[in-house]
Image: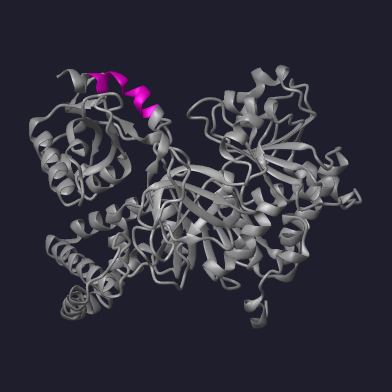
């Protein structure tokens, strides 16, 4: 790719489908590397990617896939995924996507609900798991992304391999399909934590709008390297994949187990991420420092504290504090003076110990976007202090997905999720009266614009419940706007805890304050209809080591609860100290009791979503006895 193509920016107004836009982009980048997936032995240039898409689309069309058909695609991250995705879209069909590790019952429900007649799945293992249900599923054919159907010959539904489809495509003349901005192009199902999953219908218009403004926010250059770790079927990773391909980026696919090694190995320029990734990296950095030597660990820890103080005073001096309604001239001057005294130590640390740490951990990238959940202030301050540009975004599947983003190049307002993305509108309203709130006044976040979904599949009632007659979408999130229109989130409306006294408590800000403690790994507040706030807490390994506790010796309540007086006192002190630092906390918002858990919340045990959001309802259900015990002590 010649240098002039670095400035190539997509004019989305010329296109009526996401497929046509991306196909044109892919053709521009020729022999430049497009996809590297060493775990599945896939290395493709943009020319090779285009050829594979052409053959796969033709192969599907030869088997009868046509415009408007619904095609189930069930897989985790895989280098062939973009080919599968674009092959389906080329036929004018609609992708119905989900991860292959979703419960079998959920995959069956999705294909039946969406009337999928064709299914493309990761491998024969998933097909084997689905086998008992096939008699109730009206599939015309099944495609395996890799592997063969050996041992599954008794399945009556035709089963093809990826190579079979490619082979058929070589002998079929593809017939292009007419497309429209309002055509459905994908259906993403919600996690279904509060009932049956709902199918979010997204159109070409939704994603073309996102692509239109993505470059203004991220500024990717042709040939930059990215690392793909998030679930590729998720709305967040999906738009990232489309944007990276539109810019001629080199996409490296990784796994959870291989992530840290690949991050250092490939010298990544930009990456999409979720908060859990940054929590794990920070913990890993401190652990490695401690293993190196106590002396180096203490120097690093001291340097970070100084840098955080420097950056905090700098933000105040530049008037970049999200919860400040006004700034006193003398206070601003004071913060600027303190910043000047701290700057030399921060500057020295940036060019010595931080530089070494970032190189060792593979953190020398230009920028990363963190979304899919709230990044704790502890992590925001840490990464800002050591010079890693972590930008925060916010959105939902229903908004395809980005609503706000802290743009690359703009001043970073820590604690906010940025300004509205592109031309979309946001407002904060009183949940009871629907009247607009003034800046700094908390309320319900609403959004309107071309990013909002078409609706929920076959569910007009649910659609009408979240999109009003004027097109405003109810996000269900609580937050407030700063004077310069940065959005600050405080929690979910449905997560609000109502105590027996009638007082309302937003759990997220309190949980975030508690997570500032290095001894608290995870926390979920409880107390609905109770007399006070309680918490389920997963202590960190550091806390356990400090108290000399081995997990296997501490479990005594249905394999969940840790009962240790020393650890309990340590966690109690940490909660009190960190909550006291939080301004404007009301007496009824203080944590009165808590239970320590020996097992954390994870994707594997069903308590974390694919983007690392805690599924509160599932947590409450699993630990209902522990919660009741907490209030009967």
Please report the residue visible at 40 percent of the width from the left and 32 percent of the height from the top: 607
Q: Is residue 599 magenta?
A: no
State the predominant SS element of the stretch in magenta: helix
In the rendering, at what x and y percent does residue 591 appear? 19, 36
The residues colored magenta run 618-628
Determine whether 622 is above or below 85 in the image: above
Q: Which residue is more in the foreground, 190 or 104? A: 190
Q: Quadrant of residue 494?
A: top left
What residue do we see at 65% from left, 18% from top?
Answer: 132
Answer left or right for 113 relative to 316. Answer: right
Quadrant of the drawing holding the C terminus: top left
Relative to 603, is 463 on the left or the right? Answer: right
Residue 83 position, x and y percent, is 70, 51
Q: Quadrant of residue 54?
A: bottom right
Q: Residue at x 29, y 24 (%)?
A: 529
- Examine the image and state in which quarter residue 389 appears: bottom left
The location of residue 393, given as percent across then percent down, is 46, 56
In the rendered image, the vertical position of residue 114 relative to residue 313, given as above or below: above
> Looking at the picture, how far across and down is residue 349, in whole percent?
23, 74
Could you say which is closer to the camera, residue 363 or residue 200?
Answer: 200
Vertical order, 474 against 531 (above or below): below
């Amino acid at each position: 790719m010649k240098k002039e193509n670095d400035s190539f920016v997509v004019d989305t107004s010329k296109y009526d489908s996401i497929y046509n836009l991306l196909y044109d982009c892919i053709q521009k980048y020729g022999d430049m590397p497009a996809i590297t997936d060493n775990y599945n032995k896939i290395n493709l240039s943009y020319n090779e990617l285009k050829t594979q898409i052409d053959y796969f689309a033709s192969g599907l069309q030869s088997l009868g896939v046509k415009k408007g058909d619904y095609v189930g695609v069930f897989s985790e991250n895989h280098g062939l995924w973009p080919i599968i995705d674009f092959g389906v879209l080329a036929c004018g069909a609609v992708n119905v996507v989900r991860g292959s590790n979703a419960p079998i019952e959920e995959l069956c429900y999705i294909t039946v609900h969406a009337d999928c007649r064709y299914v493309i799945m990761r491998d024969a293992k998933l097909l084997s798991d689905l086998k008992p249900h096939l008699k109730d599923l009206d599939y015309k054919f099944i495609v395996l992304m890799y592997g063969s159907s050996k041992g599954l010959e008794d399945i009556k539904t035709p089963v093809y391999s990826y190579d079979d489809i490619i082979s058929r495509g070589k002998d079929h003349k593809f017939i292009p399909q007419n497309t429209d901005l309002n055509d459905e192009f994908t259906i993403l199902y919600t996690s279904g934590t509060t009932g049956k999953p709902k199918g979010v219908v997204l159109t070409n218009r939704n994603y073309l709008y996102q692509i239109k403004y993505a470059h203004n926010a991220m500024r990717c250059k042709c040939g930059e390297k990215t690392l793909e770790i998030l679930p590729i079927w998720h709305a967040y990773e999906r738009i990232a994949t489309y944007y990276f391909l539109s810019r001629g980026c080199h996409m490296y696919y990784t796994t959870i187990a291989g992530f840290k090694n690949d991050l250092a190995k490939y010298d990544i320029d930009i990456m999409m991420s979720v908060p859990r990734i940054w929590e794990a990296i920070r913990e890993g950095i401190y652990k490695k420092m401690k293993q190196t030597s106590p002396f180096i660990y203490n120097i690093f820890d001291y340097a970070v504290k100084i840098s955080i103080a420097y950056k905090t005073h700098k933000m105040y001096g530049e008037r970049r504090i999200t919860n400040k309604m006004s700034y006193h001239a003398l206070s601003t001057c004071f913060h600027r003076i303190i910043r000047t005294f701290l700057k030399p130590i921060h500057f020295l640390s940036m060019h010595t110990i931080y530089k070494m740490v970032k190189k060792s951990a593979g953190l020398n990238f230009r920028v990363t976007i963190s979304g899919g959940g709230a990044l704790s202030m502890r992590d925001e301050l840490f990464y800002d202090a050591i010079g890693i540009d972590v930008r925060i975004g916010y959105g939902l599947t229903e908004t395809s997905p980005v609503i706000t983003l802290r743009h690359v190049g703009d001043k970073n307002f820590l604690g906010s999720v940025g300004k509205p993305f592109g031309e979309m509108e946001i407002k904060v309203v009183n949940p009871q009266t629907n009247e607009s709130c003034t800046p700094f006044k908390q309320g319900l976040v609403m959004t309107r614009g071309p990013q909002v979904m078409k609706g929920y599949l076959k569910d007009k009632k649910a659609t009408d419940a979240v999109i009003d007659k004027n097109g405003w979408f109810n996000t269900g999130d609580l937050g407030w706007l700063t004077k310069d229109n940065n959005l600050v989130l405080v929690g979910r409306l449905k997560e609000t805890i109502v105590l027996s006294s009638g007082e309302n408590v937003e759990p997220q800000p309190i949980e975030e304050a508690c997570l500032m403690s290095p001894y608290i790994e995870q926390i979920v507040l409880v107390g609905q209809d109770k007399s006070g706030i309680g918490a389920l807490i997963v202590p960190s390994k550091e806390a356990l080591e400090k108290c000399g506790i081995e997990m296997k010796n501490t479990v005594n309540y249905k394999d969940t609860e840790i009962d240790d007086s020393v650890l309990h006192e340590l966690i109690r002190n940490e909660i009190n100290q960190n909550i006291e630092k939080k301004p404007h906390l009301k007496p009824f918002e203080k944590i009165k009791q808590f239970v320590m858990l020996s097992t954390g919340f994870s994707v594997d045990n069903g308590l974390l979503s694919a983007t690392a959001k805690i599924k509160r309802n599932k947590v409450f259900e699993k630990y209902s006895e522990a919660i009741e015990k907490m209030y009967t002590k």
